[in-house]
Image (tube, rainbow, N blue to C red):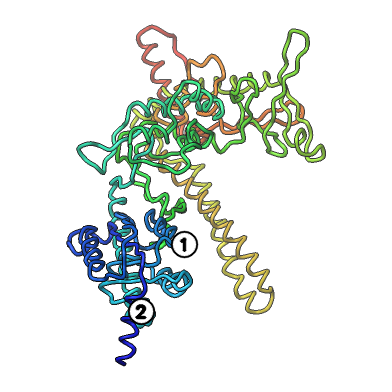
């Protein structure tokens, strides 16, 4: 035993070590105790060096504010480079938790990397010295401490995430940097207020897109006008913001504009938990499923109205055609489709002398397969004129219905029951009961061997779909019945939406987006126009029809007053 100790002392005096002193402190470690601070770590390590003459300090490596769950730390990497370049052959830390809090990775370093590089590893407080006591690297005590350090970090991560989730759900902003167009409220760090300069750019982007400009045209406008793209603006406003690959974001891009057009934050809703770390060990972000986003409505002032945001959302889902010359979307782009294959129509301009003729063709026939569909050729001006006439007709209906609704609403004798909708509800309910019974009878048939397993699953799936559809139809009808019983008003969506454009003189992208759902073109120049608010229009017509006798009575009473005053001769009013 005495000979072994003397041999170790001889080795210690004979070998000279070039050491790197490693210090680390992160937010989860805290800084309440002096023993955990960077300063105290440095003092402890230097005192150890003073007591060991066989070790000289090559450099001190400090990672202040970096997690120990991985090794993606700037000064740790610098130390590792020096180790592989043989500038150092010894690493000294205060304890294992300062080196890392990842039991898997630290085990890899202790058992593979350091022995391979012939590196001496010393943990002062944990009594680990790979040169004087090689077994200390792999004993039960060291493994247990590594496991405890890892578990501590996992526990802290869970607690922090739970705390952040509570704050997100309460509508507090906890992100590092606000969305382009917003800034932190100086009086409340977790509240957002509008940053007017970029907010005006956001408003301009939405206005241009709704007016029919393509994203490509908007990108060109923003770059030509010299507006700073979001990343550079953020870098200018927040000096601490240092994104990777910043050279890729020096100009506005399609992606940057698309992000703004789809950011729900602009309607005043707090949208968080969009990205999250892969795990407490892997500090890299990944996208979170949309259904797991934490959204709290109306937490800050809106830059964009909900109505405009919904219009943009719908337009982005449509297949659009952009004129290569003007970079502007065709006024009916995304709305006009082939009536047979339901794919979009494409526009083509034909020059004949001084005149231009615009035609629409089925995109399947033109770009995919001549056998897939037919041309469905139609003059674009003819379609636009038909759509404009359709909109004007419905505007006239809306204006005519408005005073009629007022008359019905103000009469105590108005009908509060729609027989047609009640009849429809009864029919759908009977059909639902029948389908449910058929589904119920499937299982006995399966048990008796009348149908096999695949047939049973197929039929059950079909019945489930039918049941869901019927339940939705019944729910819609019940909503209409409730609306009629309550009494319609001029605030009906059909009246309100079409009345808004009563001064229309030409077809615009804004009007089409607001009032039209789809336009179908069939062979023979037949056009089918499907408007928005069809259900509201249907309910409106049913409500007026239900009160037909009341309207006749009101009109007759009005005529009787005029007759009594000598203004009109007696007359009967025909049913409306």
Q: Residue 425: x and y, percent?
A: 50, 49
Disc 1 residue crowd, few under 14, some 14–19, many 20+, Cα 10 Å: few
Viewer-nearest residue: 29 or 355: 29
Q: Quadrant of the N terminus?
A: bottom left
Residue 106 in sight in this render: yes
Viewer-nearest residue: 371 or 437: 371
Rendering quarter of residue 198: top left
Viewer-nearest residue: 359 or 72: 72
Numbered circle sitting on residue 84? 1
Task: Classify 122 as above or below 32.
Answer: below
Q: Residue 91: x and y, percent?
A: 35, 66
Q: Residue at x 61, y 32 (%)?
A: 320
Circle 1 SS class: helix
Q: Residue 228: x and y, percent?
A: 43, 28
Q: Which badge, 1 or 2, is on the more N-terminal residue?
A: 2
Q: CA distance from mark 1 to mark 2?
A: 23 Å
Rendering quarter of residue 460: bottom right
Say whether residue 553 is left or right of residue 334: left
Viewer-nearest residue: 531 or 276: 276
Q: Residue at x 31, y 86 (%)?
A: 6
Q: Residue at x 36, y 41 (%)?
A: 241
Numbered circle sitting on residue 420? none
Numbered circle sitting on residue 11? 2
Task: Classify 319 as above or below 44.
Answer: above
Say whether residue 134 is left or right of residue 367: left
Q: Residue at x 23, y 67 (%)?
A: 50
Q: Are marks 1 and 2 in contact (CB under 8 Å)?
A: no
């Amino acid at each position: 035993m005495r000979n072994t100790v003397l041999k170790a002392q001889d080795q210690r005096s004979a070998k000279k070590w070039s050491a790197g002193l490693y210090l680390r402190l992160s937010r989860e470690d805290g800084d309440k105790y002096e023993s955990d601070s960077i300063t105290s770590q440095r003092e402890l390590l230097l005192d150890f060096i003073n007591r060991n003459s066989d070790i000289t300090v090559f450099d001190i490596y400090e990672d202040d504010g970096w997690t120990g769950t991985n090794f993606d730390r700037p000064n740790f990497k610098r130390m590792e480079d020096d180790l592989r370049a043989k500038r150092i052959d010894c690493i000294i830390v205060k304890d294992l938790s300062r080196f890392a809090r990842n039991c898997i990775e630290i085990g890899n370093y202790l058992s593979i990397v350091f022995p391979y590089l012939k590196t001496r590893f010393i943990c002062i407080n944990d009594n680990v010295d790979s040169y004087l006591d090689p077994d200390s690297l792999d004993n039960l005590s060291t493994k247990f401490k590594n496991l405890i350090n890892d578990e501590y970090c996992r526990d802290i991560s869970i607690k922090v995430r739970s705390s952040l989730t509570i704050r997100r759900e309460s509508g507090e902003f906890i992100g590092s940097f606000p969305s382009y167009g917003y800034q932190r409220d100086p009086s409340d760090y977790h509240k957002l207020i509008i940053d007017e300069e970029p907010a005006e750019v956001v408003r301009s982007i939405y206005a241009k897109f709704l007016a029919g400009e393509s994203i490509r045209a908007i990108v060109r406008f923003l770059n030509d006008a010299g507006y700073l793209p979001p990343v550079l603006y953020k870098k200018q406003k927040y000096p601490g913001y240092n994104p990777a690959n910043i050279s890729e974001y020096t100009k506005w891009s399609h992606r940057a504009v698309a992000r703004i057009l789809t950011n729900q934050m602009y309607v005043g809703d707090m949208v968080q938990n969009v990205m999250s770390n892969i795990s407490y060990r892997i500090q890299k972000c990944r996208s979170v499923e949309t259904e797991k986003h934490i959204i709290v409505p109306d937490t800050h002032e809106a830059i964009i109205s909900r109505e405009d945001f919904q219009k943009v959302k719908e337009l982005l889902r449509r297949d659009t055609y952009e004129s290569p010359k003007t970079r502007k979307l065709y006024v009916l782009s995304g709305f006009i489709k082939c009536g047979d294959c339901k794919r979009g129509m494409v526009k083509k301009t034909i020059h004949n002398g001084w005149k231009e003729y615009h035609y629409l063709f089925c995109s399947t026939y033109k770009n995919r397969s001549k056998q897939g569909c037919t041309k469905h050729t139609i003059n674009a001006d003819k379609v636009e004129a038909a759509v404009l006439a359709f909109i004007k007709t419905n505007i006239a209906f809306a204006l005519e219905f408005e005073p009629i609704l007022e008359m019905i609403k103000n009469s105590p004798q108005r009908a509060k029951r729609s027989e047609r909708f009640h009849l429809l509800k009864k029919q759908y309910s009977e059909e639902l009961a029948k389908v449910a019974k058929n589904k119920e009878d499937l299982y006995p048939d399966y048990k008796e061997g009348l149908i096999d397993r695949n047939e049973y699953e197929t039929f059950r799936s079909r019945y489930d779909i039918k049941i869901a559809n019927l339940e939705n139809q019944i729910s819609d009808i019940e909503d209409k019945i409730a609306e009629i019983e309550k009494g319609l008003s001029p605030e009906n969506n059909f009246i309100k939406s079409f009345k808004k454009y009563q001064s229309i003189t030409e077809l615009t992208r804004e009007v089409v987006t607001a009032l039209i759902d789809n336009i179908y073109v069939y062979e023979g120049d037949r056009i089918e126009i499907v408007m928005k608010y069809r259900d509201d229009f249907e309910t409106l017509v049913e409500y007026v029809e239900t009160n037909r006798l009341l309207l006749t009575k009101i009109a007759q009473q009005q005529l009787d007053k005029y007759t009594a005053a000598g203004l009109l001769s007696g007359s009967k009013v025909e049913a409306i």
